[in-house]
Amino acid sequence: MELKRLCIQNLIPGMQNIDIVGNILRISKRSFKKDGVEGQVCSVFLGDDTGTIRLVLWNEEISKVDGFNQGDGIRITGFVKQDNFGPQIRLGRFGVIERYGIGAKRRAYINELSEEGSYEIRAALLHIFESSPFYEICPKCNNSLKEDESNYVCSKDGVVEPDYAMRITGIIDDGTGSIRCVMFKDQAEKILGHNVSQAKDIVLRKGVSELFGKAKYGEYVFSGKLKQNKFFDRMEFVINSVKEIDVKEEIFLLTNN
Ligand SMILES: [Zn+2]
C-alpha cells in the first residue's frame, strides 16, 4: 500500500491511504446514545503550517490517543471523509497513530551526546571500516550464535545450521562532531544496497572493498542507542533505524523546537 504524505490544506474527501503529520491542538471526548446503543466519540483537532482538520475516533479506536496531549506531534495514516462540518480524517482498518518528531525521540547533535540513551541523529555516513560484515545467526529465532567447537549454538534452539546476517561499523558526522556507529541486519542491508546473499557473492568475487566502496553513503536520520564500549572506552551509536531525510519532518522539528 502506497502512502502519500500530505499537508492538511490538500486533504480532500475521498482520499485513501493518506499520511499526515501535525500538532494536536485539542482533544475532546463525549459519550452518545443512538438507537439504544451507547458509545464514545473523540475528536482530535490537528494543525500543521497549512491548516487544521479533525480526526474522529470511535469507541475502541479512542485508546489509540491515550497519553497524547495538546501540543504533541502526531503522525496519522487513514482516509478522508466528508461530514457535515467539512472533511475529517478516519483511521479505517489499517490506520495508524504514532508520535512524531519531538516527544518521540530526542533529536540530538553529536557534540552534545554524553550519556547513554536513545537518540535520533541527522548525520552523514562518511565511512565504513573494512572487515567482513557477515556473522552467524539462528535460522529459527535470528539470535546471534555461540561457536562451540565446530557447532553453532543458539541459546534457545540448541545446535543449528547457521544463517548469516550483516553488521557494519562506520563513522557518522553531523557537522558538530563525529561518532562511531554500528548497524545490523536490515539497516546494514539498506546502506550496502544488497541483501546477505548478494553481498556474500560480491565479497567472494571482488572483495569487501568492492561492497563497501559502493555503499550508499550520505545523509540520513539515524535512530538508536548511545552505548559505552567498555573495551575501547568510547561511546558508540548502535543504530536501529535508518531513514531518508524527510523534508516535512525537518521543517516540523525546526518550527517546533
Ligand atoms: Zn534460535
Image: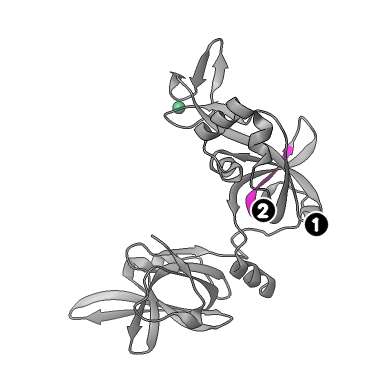
Residue 226 image position (x, y, % from top left): 70, 45
- Looking at the image, which is closer to me, 16 or 32? 16
- Looking at the image, which is closer to me, 240 or 230? 240
Residue 157 image position (x, y, % from top left): 43, 23
Query: Does the Cβ of the disc 1 residue fall within 8 Å of ligand 1?
Result: no
115 up-or-down from 138: above or below:
below
State the mark number for residue 175: 1
Q: Secondary structure at mark 1?
A: loop
Q: Is residue 65 visible?
A: no
| Magenta stretch prevailing secondary structure | strand
Residue 184 image position (x, y, % from top left): 59, 38
Q: Mark 2: which amino acid? A: Tyr
Query: Does the Cβ of the disc 2 residue fall within 8 Å of ligand 1?
Result: no
| Quadrant, the N terminus | bottom left
Q: Nearer the viewer, mark 2 or mark 1?
A: 1
Question: Which residue was labeled with disc 2?
Answer: 119
153 up-or-down from 184: above or below:
above
Give the class, few, some or many, for how many residues have Cα within 10 Å of label 2's Cα (few <14, many ≥20): many
Residue at horizontal 64%, vertical 52%?
222
Residue at horizontal 44%, vertical 31%?
141
The magenta region covers 219-228
Q: Is residue 223 magenta?
A: yes
Q: Is residue 88 left or right of residue 119?
A: left
Circles 2, 1 touching at the beta carbon (< 8 Å): no
- Looking at the image, which is closer to me, 23 or 199? 199
Q: Mark 1: which amino acid? A: Gly
Give the class, few, some or many, for how many residues have Cα within 10 Å of label 1's Cα (few <14, many ≥20): few
Q: Quadrant of ligand 1?
A: top left
In the image as oriented, which residue stretches furthest toward the front? 205
Residue 104 image position (x, y, % from top left): 59, 61
| Quadrant, the C terminus | bottom right
Q: Secondary structure at mark 2?
A: strand
